[in-house]
Each structure stands twice: as C-alpha cells, then as structure tokens.
Amino acid sequence: MNSRLAEKDEEIQQLHVAINDLEQYSRRSHLRIHGLRVPENAECKDAVCNFMKENLRRPDGNPICLSPEDIDAAHPLPARKNDSANQNQKKRPPSLIVRFFARDTRDKILRARKQLKSSGVSITEDLTNENLALLKRLQTSSEYDSCWAWMGKIYAKKKGSDSAIKVKLYDL
C-alpha cells in the first residue's frame, strides 16, 4: 500500500510539473512591464511602443522600433486586493502584460531591458506562479549567488561556481 501511495505521489508530481510547463509555454510570447505609466485615454499598445522607442536601443545603437502591429494585446493587470505594498506606497502604476505576435521581437526587448536600470521601469518574463515562487526562493537562498529566468526556465549559479544550472520545480 505504501509503495502504491509513493507511486501515486510521484505521478501527481510529474503531472504538476507537466501542467506548469504547458502553462509556461503558453506565456512564451508575453512580457510584464512594471512601473510604466499609461496616460489616461491612451492605448496601452501605443504607450508601450513609444516607451520602447525612446528608451531601448539595439546593439548597433539604433532605437528598438516597435509598432502597435507587433503587439497582439497589451493591457494593465489588476492590482492584488491584499497587496499592502501598494496601499502603503504612492499609487504605483499597474503592471502591464504585453503579448507579441513574434517571439524574436519579445526577445530583443528582453535583451535590451538592462538599459532601464535606473528608470523605475522593469521588464520581466511572464512566469507562472510556481516558477515565480521558485525564482523568489532562489533569490532569498544563501546557497546561490544569482538566479534568473530565460525562455520560461529558471537558472541559478551556486556560490563559488562559474556555471549555471537549470533549476526545476521540485529541486529545492
């Protein structure tokens, strides 16, 4: 009976990982933009395109030109009801979710996001709740120097190591 229970637990864990992977795959063309203020009565797509053109540059120095036709959808995300950080701070702009028609356009923006370091705006991948929780656990862990997400996968470098490892949901 115990061995059957262990088999079922393993099977449930594998199914949970498979569902998370499928959900992450469905988000492969999405980005989240935090801190970007969209003027009232303005289209989110236009605001995103203007911000990218003004603030992000390609490696050759030219601006990243984005048109609203490159974006499938863009809209603000609702604030969390019990988010005490939002209630205590000045009203921060809501995060935006942006879905691109082409992943290479999304990837160009992700590669250029480090140019936004001191702008108050950040761009992240749209991670599932499980992957985001894993990333946060790694960031607060004393075992790892750095961690990041790329293409929906979570990577980390252990202290004293030069190589990165891919971290999966149940590795920690």
Image (cartoon, rainbow, N blue to C red):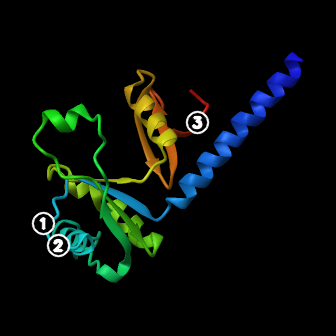
Q: Which residue is mark 3?
A: 169
Query: Could you say whether the residue bearing mark 3 is in a helix, strand or loop?
Result: loop
Q: Which residue is mark 1?
A: 39
Residue shown at the point (12%, 67%) measured from the top left: 40
Taking the spot 28% from the left edge, 71% from the top edge, the residue there is 58
Identity of the amino acid at label 2?
Ala
Q: Position of residue 92 (x, y in %)?
A: 16, 47
Relative to 14, 147 lies left or right: left
Q: In whole angstroms, how far apart are the C-alphas of marks 2 and 3?
A: 39 Å
Residue on which disc 2 sits: 42
Do residues under tags 1 and 2 come within 8 Å of each other at their CB atoms?
A: yes
Q: Residues within 10 Å of mark 1 (few under 14, many from 20)?
A: few
Residue at x 83%, y 28% (from the top left corner): 7
Give how far across and how far down residue 107 sits, in percent: 41, 65
Residue 2 seen in the current view: yes
- Label 1 to label 2: alpha-carbon separation: 5 Å
Residue 106 image position (x, y, % from top left): 40, 67
